[in-house]
Image (cartoon, coloured by chain):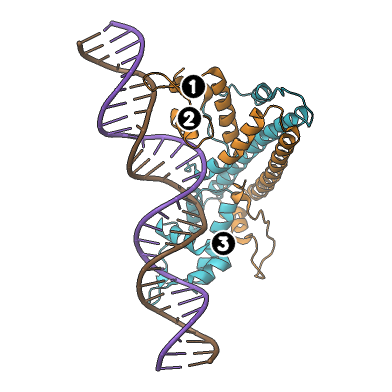
Chain colours: A cyan, B orange, C brown, D purple
Amino acid sequence: MNIGDAATRSGVSAKMIRYYEQIGLIPTAARTVSGYRNYAPDDVHVLRFIARARDLGFSIGEISELLDLWRDKNRHSADVKALAQARVTDLRLKIVHLQDMADTLENLAHSCGGNERPDCPILQGLEVATGEPAGSTTHQAVNFSSFKKRTAT
Amino acid sequence: MNIGDAATRSGVSAKMIRYYEQIGLIPTAARTVSGYRNYAPDDVHVLRFIARARDLGFSIGEISELLDLWRDKNRHSADVKALAQARVTDLRLKIVHLQDMADTLENLAHSCGGNERPDCPILQGLEVATGEPAGSTTHQAVNFSSFKKRTAT
DNA sequence: CTTGACCTTCCCATCATGGGAAGCCCCATA
DNA sequence: TATGGGGCTTCCCATGATGGGAAGGTCAAG
């Protein structure tokens, strides 16, 4: 099948399929005489795997590891499990932080709520409520985008 | 204080401070006669908040709104409150998505022995549960759909 | 006055992704 | 058979947030 079919069937855009090929995440596709990339159902399978893993927040590097493990018949479950658990730990931490932030903002909304009060203690409030000396360690970024781009260690 | 001081005290790198100024997230800093940027403690407060918000995955656009919310002391209290509450709703939604994701991964990890046997179901889970197969084989999908695209404003 | 640590601007790279242009290719239909 | 529209190719550019580094000016301590 052509790349467009593979894209719609896998949920990975054609652009991304070419990109994944280019960076070596997937092998170079077979070509037709006229140069079109040609994909087999198995390739779609792999692409689905990739799409799913991306959805779950795995970085490309991690997906590469997962693919290696997946394709390796002698793979070790422990490796895969460790990878997944690392993601879970990241996620739990993020959730806690986001809840902090949501609570803070909610308080802010209440304290600044709708009247003519001239001086909402917003700045101080947020700074206190967000805790964290903030000059402290630039701790490993815990946010949506950074966990994606953090190169797997 | 100089930009280096502001950077270490706020946890935002000097590079980023200049960038935030350039894109208008923070106002152009005062300059000394020789052209050095000069910061007051209040500026550090703002930078700290930015650092915190970035840490939590807010986009620059969102942080810009939050800062407006902060600085807009009393004039449009109702609007300000609405904005804050919208952000809170956003946050709660993000939290839900993250929890979904974490739960899924945790389930996968939990059912994986973590030993040397190559039967860890994490890989199968990744392989199978592609969201939205559009009338295809499996539909046990978990569907966080566009979670990773949440960079919306 | 020298030295080294700081500051300035400017340019480039990153990662994952999308947009779009220019130019082939394939198939259905008139 | 010719044609048109849509799919494919490569190539270049842009994004957002961040870092690296060069070339050069500045400050403060020795």
The percent coordinates of residue C12 (x first, y second) are 33, 44
- Residue under circle 1? B6
Location of residue B9 with respect to B63 vertically, above or below = above
Number of marks present in the image shown: 3
Q: Which badge, 1 or 2, comes first in the chain's sequence? A: 1
Q: CA distance from mark 3 to mark 2?
A: 40 Å
Q: Are marks 1 and 2 in contact (CB under 8 Å)?
A: yes
Q: Chain of mark 3?
A: A
What residue do we see at 48% from left, 30% from top? Answer: B17
Disc ID at residue A48: 3
Say which of B134 and B146 sits in front: B146
Element marked by disc 1: helix
Q: Nearer the viewer, mark 3 or mark 2?
A: 2
The percent coordinates of residue C11 (x first, y second) are 32, 42
What residue do we see at 64% from left, 50% from top? Answer: B108
Residues tagged by mark 3 and mark 2 found on one chain of the structure: no
Q: Chain of mark 1?
A: B
Left or right of A94, for residue A24 = left
Disc ID at residue B17: 2
Q: CA distance from mark 3 to mark 1?
A: 46 Å
Left or right of A43, for residue B70 = right
Q: Chain of mark 2?
A: B
Element marked by disc 2: helix
Check disc 2 and give the amino acid type: Ile
Location of residue B27 with respect to B108 vertically, above or below = above
Task: Using a 10 Å C-alpha cutoff, classify the residue at mark 2 as few (fewer than 14 neighbours), some (14 to 19) or many (20 or more).
Answer: some
Task: Using a 10 Å C-alpha cutoff, classify the residue at mark 1 as few (fewer than 14 neighbours), some (14 to 19) or many (20 or more).
Answer: many
